[in-house]
Amino acid sequence: MKTAVIMDVQRYSIHDGPGIRTTVFFKGCHMACAWCHNPESQRPEAEMLFYEGRCIGCKSCLALCKRGAHRMDGGQHRVELALCRDCPEMAACAQSCPAGALQLCGQVMDAVQLLEKVLADRPFYGKEGGVTCSGGEVLLQDEFLMEFLPLCKENGISTCLDTTFNVDWERIEKLLPYVDWILADLKFMDDAAHRRYTGAEGTRTRENLKCLSKLEKRVILRMPLAAGVNDSPEEMEARREFLRTLPNVERVDCFAVTNHGAEKYRALQRQPVFFNRDMDLEALVKRAEDSLELSRTECARER
């Protein structure tokens, strides 16, 4: 049985598809969006986060560490997270921290184990809810999904994929019989800007959306907005023209990216990049809606 590294299982999600849903966050992404609010989802393997401000200096982790990743510096606890990678003691180290300053992100599960977690929430789904598989980039886990999604359908659970849609079509097509909804990101129409801000080209996303439209698959399109980055009149006009070719898109969610993931970047010992500082986020979203001439739009700030 295939396994996947699961970052989190979030219950009572109301922004990740229709109804009340259980959102499963898979680790691993081939993109690195500059505004990513889940940077801990990018690496495919389990990893440690260190929230320095929560540390109470109890030194319990120092007693466990055999790699020299932990040290005291003038009474301040310092951690070199690069030394924690692939350490077999990461789970024990995180569990030893009484303040939650050390947190292990990533748990290996097989499809049956994950299904058990989802089934626990089934009474809350009603007619519209279900499970949403997110990431990272969930379509990198296509082999795992080929085991997990059929199990969901056998148990009467609606399924949704939350994806950049930036993978080869062959990885997508085989999953479609087991998928009810797709949440797809459209970040840029300009390929140079797409590469600059995400680390990957965006042509496949658009091509895959066109293929999906031909199959009349139900899609909710998401458009993250960063002022001065992807909200130019030219970009919006290109998006508007592209949307006209996708009659299967049932809703477009425009949302302004925010900076609430900054603490997680620091916990990973990475520097956050800030967008939309001192911006009127509602006005930013409204301008995008007006430019796109959307008649059915859910306005949403990034969660």
Image (spheres, rainbow, N blue to C red):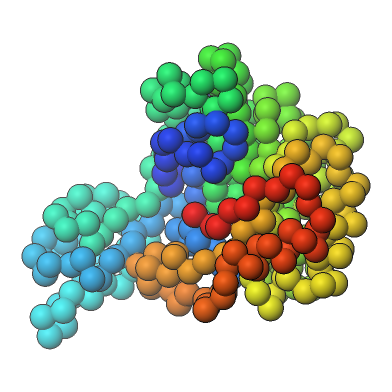
Percent coordinates x, y for residue 118 in the rendering = 45, 27
Indicate whether 186 appears above or below 169: below
- Residue 107 sits in quarter: top left
Q: Residue at x 51, y 21 (%)?
A: 126
Q: Is residue 13 visible?
A: yes
Residue 97 position (above or below residue 70) = above
- Percent x, y for residue 264? 39, 64
Number of residue marks: 0
Residue at 56% x, 75% y: name it: 279
Please state which of residues 285 and 215 is positioned toward the viewer in this rendering: 285
Left or right of residue 124, residue 170 in this image: right
Q: Is residue 70 left or right of residue 279?
A: left
Res 80 → quadrant: bottom left
**For the point 57% across and 72% down, which residue is it?**
280
Residue 95 horizontal/vertical position (percent) = 20, 50
Q: Is residue 64 visible in this depiction of the protein?
A: no
| 194 or 127, nearer to the observer | 127
Above or below, 292 relative to 232: above
Up the image or down, 258 lies above or below 4; here it is below
**Along the horizontal axis of the image, is 181 left or right of 118?**
right
| Residue 121 position within the rendered picture, expressed as x and y whole percent measured from the top left | 41, 25
Residue at image coords 49%, 24%: 125
Q: Is residue 93 left or right of residue 259?
A: left
Q: Nearer the viewer, residue 47 or 285?
A: 285
Q: Residue 17 or 56: which is nearer the viewer?
A: 17
